[in-house]
Image: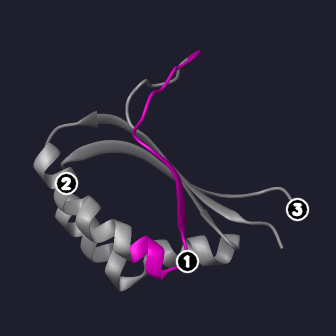
Amino acid sequence: MPKGYWVSVYRTIADPEKLAAYNKLAGPAVKAAGGRTFARGGRVVAHDAGVAERVVLIEFDSFEQAVAARASAAYQEALAVLADGVERDFRIIEGLG
């Protein structure tokens, strides 16, 4: 079964305090849903139309698990705290076989 991944690229961080509050809730919510964080922040080299801002990569055992984690009550609470604190491109993608 293909794994599922959350890929999130932050275009701008307007409110670092909202992001910090989100991280406190999102981390445990993701872990409880079976997610494993492979990258968060760190160095970025952007190419083409890429954005050299914060990038997050989280792996789940399946695409369905990744979708369910995003819809979970715990993660929705984290999103409510984040609100308009950032502008990001968030995607859930299916891995290769």
What residue did someone put label 3 on?
97
What residue did someone put label 2 on?
20
Inter-mark Cα distance, 2 to 3? 35 Å
Q: Position of residue 47 (x, y in %)?
A: 58, 16
Task: Say what secondary structure mark 2 lies in.
Answer: helix
For label 2, the crowd category at 10 Å Cα-Cα, with few meaning under 14, some 14 to 19 and many 20 or more, is some
Left or right: residue 74 versus residue 95 is left
Residue found 18% across the figure and 48% down from its top: 85
Q: Amino acid at mark 1?
A: Gly
Of 47 and 24, the residue lying toward us: 24
Inter-mark Cα distance, 1 to 2? 21 Å
Write down the region rendered in magenta.
29-48
For label 3, the crowd category at 10 Å Cα-Cα, with few meaning under 14, some 14 to 19 and many 20 or more, is few
For label 1, the crowd category at 10 Å Cα-Cα, with few meaning under 14, some 14 to 19 and many 20 or more, is some
Colouring style: one colour
Residue found 25% across the figure and 44% down from its top: 86
The image quadrant that residue 88 belongs to is top left
